[in-house]
Amino acid sequence: MYGVCGCCGALRPRYKRLVDNIFPEDPEDGLVKANMEKLTFYALSAPEKLDRIGAYLSERLSRDVARHRYGYVCIAMEALDQLLMACHCQSINLFVESFLKMVRKLLEADKPNLQILGTNSFVKFANIEEDTPSYHRSYDFFVSRFSEMCHSSYEDPDIRTKIRMAGINGLQGVVRKTVNDDLQSNIWDPQHMDKIVPSLLFNLQCGEGTESRSPSPLQASEKEKESPAELTERCFRELLGRAAYGNIKNAVTPVLMHLDNHSLWEGKTFAVRCFKIIMYSIQSQHSHLVIQQLLGHLDSNSKNSATVRAGIVEVLLEAAAIASSGSVGPTVLEVFNTLLRQLRLSVDYELTGSYDASGNIGTKIIKTHEERQLQEAVIRTIGSFANTLPTYQRSEVMLFIMGKIPVPGVHPALTNAGSGGNEGTRMIQIMLLKSLVQVTTGFQTTNMLTALPNSFLEPLLSFSLMEDPEVRLLVLTILLRVIDRHDNTPKFSRISIISDISVLKLKVDKCSRQDNLFMKKHAQQLYRHIYLACKEQSSGPQHFETLYTLLALISMELANEEVVVDLIRLALALQDLAQTNEESLSVYNRCAVHALSAAYLNLICQLTTVPTFCQHVHEVIEMRQKEVPFLLPEGVFRENPKLPATLDKLEGDVLFQQSKITEVLGGSGYNTDRLATPYIPQFTDEDRLSKRKSIGETVSLQVEMESRNSPEKEERTPAEEITFETLKNAIVDSVGMEEQERERRRQVVEKFQKAPFEEIAAHCGARATLLQSKLNQIFEITIRPPPSPSGTISSGYGQTQSRSVPVYEMKFPDLCVY
């Protein structure tokens, strides 16, 4: 028998004998290296035998696995690995099939060591670059099996960690092997990504203590390399780094679903970490795709809890900060529109107390607190996105947000929740203005005409006339952010009398031509709104400090000689406002206006560097410090200011004298005629956009124009004889006539502001009826037909009347026809 077997063994194919010879009698001895070299040489010499060698090795391995001879299994896999690494030829495809069959056999085994052995062999295979593509190879089983290993729940924690790490390595190998092979099944398909990405996130979450520290993995120590979380992060980064433009969505969608299914938005930390890895790993030109997916996910969760939406918004905030200037992508306004829509919805939810019309009022307090946090997060995110935009796009966003701010009486109420409409409108105004503050933070422009166009400046200034002090303060803050181009605002954060402004180290540039054009066009609007802001009863210390900063910035950023003169006139007009008290201001407000005027004149006199002007201002300030310290900033803008019960009419040296200032500045070349003219605010069209200005003002101006051109004034006065006395009287009375005209305008405007709506409607209706009657008379005269050749007809009452016959029906004599 032994002789027969020996004889038959000698007749076996050579490749089988070479394969058998690599296995020692005792598996503990390991692979027989000399025989392995012979087998490798034979495989290289006869590559057509590779497929048979692989098939025979696969047969032996299957038999050894079934017999639990794991030592020989390890030897077989080592031999396969060496053959795989050594043989790079066209025939390797047939050998790979046998190799993958053996790896699959090991992965299906129950023993963790066999699973890890098979995974390690697969990883080695994945690192081999094949010369020829494979048409029929499939990795679906490996994706599923490696994903399953990533979720291993083996009892022994050390073995469980090894199995999970093997699964992660296996997924990394599958990605490397298939991502660049067009003939393989697309690894980016949802069926594969839905297994790979959640498996990676699961292991990343288990090691959440490890922080994502850099845009690319750092060289970790040996101990850190053993961490599944660290390995997962590297694998996840590699996967995302290989994603092309069309694959970003398939890679990010499973991340969103995983965070949803495991309620990981509320914690924010893990969600932020995941998207930090994503944003740092993908190609920068694809950043906007991730942003768009996050925005779409935010919209789909509009009715979810505030904590979930706040988590998504926080992720957006971090993603926008990481991404480059292209993070917003081509649809700039759509990004901000989505965020503003979420802001509006949050305000609506806060007012109603629920996400539906029939909400539980008992949970309103909790939800209000959560919604406020969401609103602040959205506002910060809007600012974060705006910071990535160039100046021209940021100007468009400012206009876009301004167009979203509701104006009472023009836009519908925010909600239908009874009295919540007005409160909702106020809240959304404040939220959108806060968004504008964020957008204008760090805003730098060289041309104020483009930074503050009419379409933005006019509605913005109209909100400065609102009764709500918070709205007015936000408007002033926005103006400061846009006007300040040299970061001078912090130097005027506190209103005070500065004896020497050189310590502030102010940055002052010469006013450019564009700035001069801007001030020529809009200066009177700015002055008027500063003046009106000082008349508000609800203005507090912050308002006056912001107004002081605004005056100071205009003086340094936009001032020429004419602007300086107008600002001095404005400061003196504010002093007169507090002095005459026509608006019945409180004692505190009057003292605050006096202090504002004094602080600004102290600043502007040092900027003009006219010694006599500075001397006059300092003399008045010193006199106030001695006699009336409550008219200076240090005496008013502090805790518990000591104010008098009443503020009697002040006289003498404690007031700034317009005549004196005109005299000293006139000697330095300033326009004395303009300085001597008191500043009087001018009415402008944009004032009528404010809450306080009703439609009555518009009607009043229309009626005024009608009264001038009314057809009632048919009687013409005889031409007056013009003499020298007439011209003299006209010149003398011109000032008085202007005052009368201004008073008449004020009375007309006041009438239409304060009169009841019914009275205004009746007045306008009467005017319309009168106009219609006059038009009817004119039409009757002009459209009356000529006498008819057909004569007259008799009416039914025995009277005769002319019959109106159309011209084309009239019969004319032949001689009259041309």
Image: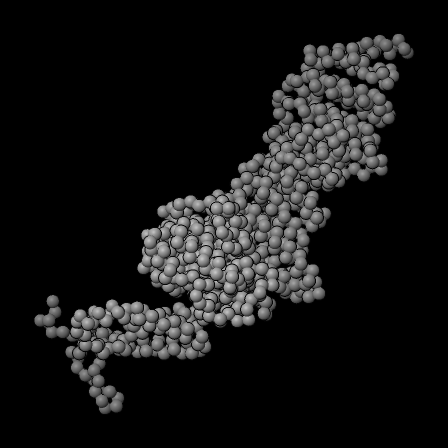
| Residue 428 seen | no
Q: In the rendered image, which quarter contains the C terminus? A: bottom left
Counting from the top left corner in percent of width and height, residue 464 is at 48, 61
> Viewer-proximal residue, 747 or 57?
747
| Residue at horizontal 39 percent and vertical 51 percent from the top | 610
> Viewer-proximal residue, 356 or 555?
555
- The residue at the far right in this view is 1
Residue 94 against residue 299 in the figure, above or below: above
| Residue 345 seen | yes
Residue 112 against residue 621 in the figure, above or below: above
User: Horizontal placement of 661 versus 600: left or right?
Assistant: left
Asked which quadrant contains residue 577, the reply is bottom left
| Residue at horizontal 22 percent and vertical 74 percent from the top | 782
- The residue at the far bottom in this view is 798
| Residue at horizontal 58 percent and vertical 43 percent from the top | 321
> Viewer-proximal residue, 771 or 553?
553
Asked which quadrant contains residue 641, the reply is bottom right
Q: In the rendered image, which quarter contains the N terminus? A: top right
Counting from the top left corner in percent of width and height, residue 497 is at 50, 55
Residue 57 against residue 355 in the figure, above or below: above
User: Horizontal placement of 776 versus 816: left or right?
Assistant: right
Counting from the top left corner in percent of width and height, residue 408 is at 50, 65
| Residue at horizontal 44 percent and vertical 76 percent from the top | 755
